Amino acid sequence: MLSTEKYKEKSPAEAIGRFMLAIAAGYMLSETQLAGVSSFADISLAGALGLPASSAVLTGSLMHSIIGGNIGKNIVKIAAMIMILILKLFFDDRTEPRFCGAGTALSIFLSGASVSVLIGEMWYKLIFYIVYSAISGYTAYSAAIIISGLRKRSVIDLTSSGGCAYSVVYAIVISILCTAQIPVIDPGIIAGTVVTLCGVYFYRHTGGVVCGSLTVCGAFLASPETGMSIVLLPVAGLITGYVREKKYTLTAAVFVVTDIMLTVFTGVSQNEFIGLIDIVSGAVLFTLLAPLYSDKWFITGSGEESSLPELMNVRMGFLADSIGNVRCESGKIAEILLEKSDCERDSEDICEQICTQCFKRLDCWKNNYSVTRRGFRKLGELAEFSVEMFPYELSDCLHTEELLELYEEHSKQRTTARLLEMRFSESRQLIFEQIEIMEEMISAAGERLNVRYSPSVSSQIKEKLRKFGIVHKNVIAYYNHKNRLLIEIYFASGDCPRSFTRICDLISDELRVSLGNSDPVSSGKEVRVRLFEKPEYSLEVYGASICAGGNEDNGDTSMTFGDGTGVSYVILSDGMGSGRKAAVESQLVVRLFRKLINSGVNYTSAIKMINSVMVTKSQEESFATLDAVRIDLDSGKLTVIKSGAAPTLIKKRDGIIRVAAPNFPIGIYTRPEIFCRDFDFDEGDILIMFSDGVSENEYMYVKELLTSESDLKKIVDEICEKSAIFNPSPRFDDVTVIGVRMCRSQFVNM
């Protein structure tokens, strides 16, 4: 049944205007030609539009056929459009693209086959109508996609299926314009030149080749002669796309000159000369219309994906700057409030309280103002309040005892206020430090990554996980600057699989790439795991430790981990003292560092955050050293990171480097001191990290050992065993030694 509710929403003038426009389109398209036969443009248009507009197209086509006396010639087209109207009357999804395409193809085939049966040419015309109906149906399907997309977003979407639909319709439109009977000029070539130049100017060589090729395709559909006259249009678009200028006129000039030169080199015929005139006309029209172009109305996929990270980077940077501005303004406000709350006006308050009721007020504050003022200022600066310390300038004062009592009371209040302000200042400084950390984290999160996203690999992995019933939230596959594949898979906490090794094996088999997987990282609501191709280098790590005084708990904590992107960390923390308490502090530092790094926080912000936690976790004094190395296994870049830690030794081919940092451990001050230094870490280089239990007296021995020995395990064990011999202090501390060697990765081909 015909539904009219959605048409009632339109104004009568708008409905009448659209109806008349559809009649005009049907009238003009009725007698157009395509590839030497009657065009199906009016039929496809009727199939793509809604019921009222389809009837209007039929009306326009009938009017043209009646006026031209071609009813019999166009009987197949008219019958097909009548069948399309009948189908739209009885189906609700009359504007659904698939229905439009299938209904149009079916209507043309049935009407053509029926007419052929009546005139006795059934078998002769059957193959023709099969091809004709298929092409017409697909054109109607494409037009319906375009109309549906414009209704939803009012924007020309040239990506995915939308781009294919616009390509089909554009080629048909160019073909129809090329068959228009207009003296001297060819409107199809002119329109195609304008579109090709727009593609060249706004989308460079890609746009020039695509638009030029579609224009030539449409021209060939009109006639081979027309197509041959502009066959070099895509080549001109390609060349101009590489040498385009920033001005419309220069772009048009380069395009025209390039096309003329190519045409001259290949030989100029009469048709090609006429085509050059149309191309020049199109170039002139382009220079007039190009300033009106706006990418607001186009989605091409040529820059949207690459510009989105840039947009996020700008937004994150702006947000970080805004937070920093709030922090600075809060500090200024706190200083202003502090100035207003300071007890610098005690003298004025006491004077009003004591001197106002005194009969000698005028004599003191008028006749002897400077002396009295000086006396009150001295009184306010006293540390002890007694009659003996009373200023001689106020020796004639009648209220000595009262002044001393009031000043002493105000002094106590001022001292209390200063103590409170010191406490508030420490808390305020800590809050500002935490805000600054947040500012740095947001700014770092917005930094643009040097990676190349792979939508095809991402889709392939998603399909593989669905096939094996593995529920996931998102999959992101990309290649880093070394063209190494990295994959991030996100799961809801409730859907997190028990074994990530199985997932790694499944995806390795699917992609035929040997992959490793990092440890899962939880944000509370989601769990992320990273899969990765092996980087160029790997690490050999060995550690040894000795507990001080026979304690069961070692106050030193060490850990080696990777963030899944090809960066590995080796971290060593020494808690204050030894035993259980020191172990808890060092474990807290190491675990927090790993958690923050794996969550995406850079190491400087991570250390500041850990320091904030250590400062505020309890009223008791607690601190721990932090000694970490960050090693990029793709580039071999080594970063040594220290906060109050012992020196590190790096053995390279040309000698041994000692890296020391005279800063304080984490948890002592609200603003931590962080030492960072970069080095090249090549294959075969060795790095030795120590806790404070290894005395610097042993360093010369360690250097000799590194020079003469290459077995990493033997080096570490030897240093650890000899630590007691080189320690001059009778008090022993926990000893931990870690050795790291850079090695070449062993790749596995699948």
Image (spheres, rainbow, N blue to C red):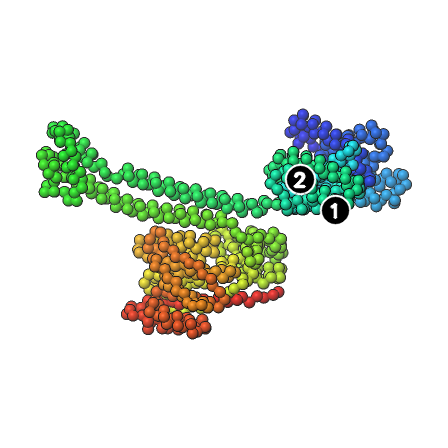
Q: Residue at x 34, y 55 (%)?
A: 667
Residue type at the position of mark 2:
Ala
The residue identified by callout 2 is: 253
The picture places residue 452, in percent across and down from the top left corner, at: 57, 53
The picture places residue 65, in percent across and down from the top left corner, at: 82, 31
Give the number of the disc on residue 248: none
SS at badge 1: helix
Looking at the image, can residue 268 be seen? Answer: yes
- Which quadrant would the N terminus be assigned to in this image? top right
Q: Mark 1 Cα within 10 Å, few/some/many (few <14, many 20+)?
A: few
Distance of label 2 from label 1 (alpha carbons): 18 Å
- Which quadrant would the C terminus be assigned to in this image? bottom right
Looking at the image, can residue 81 be seen? Answer: no
Residue type at the position of mark 1:
Phe
| Vertical placement of residue 676 versus 276, above or below | below
The answer to whether 365 appears left or right of 544 in the picture is left
The residue identified by callout 1 is: 265
Q: Residue at x 75, y 39 (%)?
A: 275
Q: Residue at x 42, y 72 (%)?
A: 707
